[in-house]
Image (spheres, rainbow, N blue to C red):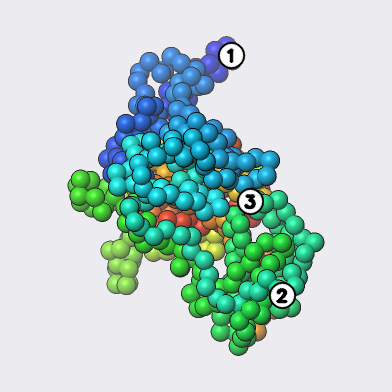
Amino acid sequence: MQHCTSVIFCLELSYNCTMSLVRLSPQVQRIQTNSPYIDIYTNALTSPLRSRPTKQHAALTLSHAHPKPKRWENAGGWGARHMNDRAPFNLWDKKNRKFRMPKGDELRWLRDNFGDGQFGMSGWYLWIEAANPPQPIPLTVGCMPVMFIGMGEEHSEPMPQCPYPNPRVRDPCPALQWPVMTFPTKEQNIALLTALQSIANVREIIYMPHWTIVELEYGDGRNYEPKSLPGTVAGRTTLYHHAEAPFYKSMKNWTRARRVDPAQYPSANFGPMPQDGQNYLRKSSHLSPGCRLECGYGIPGSQTEGINAATSAGVKLRRFDGQDVLTVSYHGFLISQEVYHPFADEDKIGDIIDATPELDIALVKLTPTSSEKFTNTCYFQAETPRVLLEGSEIKQGSWSEVDGMSSGLVSLLTYGRRYLKPKRPAGHPEIDFREWRAYSVDAIFGAVNNTICDGMRGAPIVQCETGGVGGFFHPSDGLNCFAAHLDDLVAEGWQLA
């Protein structure tokens, strides 16, 4: 009898799980087809999307209820191949850990398939000019990340312009080394910052695939002469940024931002950007990551009266003591601690009980009904969340997915890592390097703009290869996402419920 019960549960879970794979607001996913320079769907031989389930799925086991399209091969690091990548070659040199330029027949294949526009490569991605981008867009070509740009557009990686680096100045830590196109360990980062401590006042460090960017504290009274700082640190080319505004403020490529903004294309005819306003508590069997949430309205008489904010649901966590919570974006609930789905005049699902502002994470105690109905086993079109990751488990070059209530399915590529000094009140001692905040720098491969990204806040970033949750979506400039590492949550005993 127990065996029979478990089978029924499995079938019921299978059916319920598949029922939310397709959003009840299909216009949200259609956003992703309206920016031709990032449209991976139109004319695809195999759709990247899972299809809407039918009643017959109730008779299938969980493993066969919704066969997933294979969107990626080897998505856990550099050298991944996207499903639309038909190139008969591989540009990733696994032995030497670097990408190579295409040559000979490979160049001819590029011309035959993408036209006569110019192309070039940074150390970690290919760019291709196209007056009429291919349909569908591949996110890699020959296993190398690719960005399609307009004819004649300038395209280069943002780099600091400070005149401080000098390759003739001695490397302060020449024995400190790690493999190329990988991230340093936490201990290696501490060793590097310690080596710089006597010659520069560092407020942030960013590890890019081929160089390191050191942000210097601004307004501390220290001055640096041109060519006075080492141009090589730990064997890596090192550049410096010294300004009041952080370097990431200059990372946005405005031309690229317009290319991927669906609002720039009249054929989209969206008007205001659509959001998934469906009530999954009432119309579906469960709530899941990526559902629309709103905070309560500001109190009467306050500056926020009648104002609220909308973001995307995170994941349900369980601590070692049995407590369950839902993660949400802290910055989406500054006005009110009350959490509603999908609108503030519909169902209240819980209240904020704890928050970590620097991580942009708040924890919600769900109502009994909402807690019972919330499941991590489905995440619309994105990879299913399976485990919380610590920062050390996130590899450079790995691909992840987000499915926010304002975006539909969007892909992310982790290419950088930031360590940021926490702000301290004047007169307080400096925080140990070990306590600096760590963030992944993810390139967004999807049709997005600032409005869409705001609605994606709080949605889990799930690795395609492992189902690991590496962070929660936090927009920076519409082209990059800075996701705080979750080591503190893991250390506190939280895991996926």
> In this view of the protein, which residue sits in the foreground, 168 or 430?
168
Q: Quick one: SS at disc 2?
A: loop
**Measuring 59% from the left and 72% from the top, which residue is drawn there?**
240
Separation of disc 3 and disc 1 at Cα? 50 Å
Which residue was labeled with disc 1? 3
Check disc 3 and report the residue beneath it.
Answer: 181
Say how many tags the image has: 3
Figure quadrant of residue 223 = bottom right
User: Can residue 145 be seen at all in this image of the molecule?
Assistant: yes
**Percent x, y for residue 373?**
44, 36
Label 1 packing within 10 angstroms: few (<14), some (14-19), many (20+)? few
Q: Earlier in the sequence, mark 3 or mark 1?
A: 1
Query: Of marks 2 and 3, which one's residue comes earlier in the chain?
Result: 2
In the rendered image, residue 34, in percent from the top left (x then y), is placed at: 28, 44
The kind of residue tagged 2 is Val
Kindly report the distance in space between the C-alpha atoms of the residues bearing marks 2 and 1. Answer: 71 Å
Residue 472 percent location from the top left of the image:
50, 51
For disc 2, the marked residue is 169
- Residue at x 48%, y 55% (from the top left corner): 481
**In the rendering, which numbered label is found on residue 483?**
none
Q: Position of residue 218 (x, y in %)?
A: 56, 80
The answer to the question of whether label 2 and label 1 lie on touching residues, with beta carbons closer than 8 A, is no
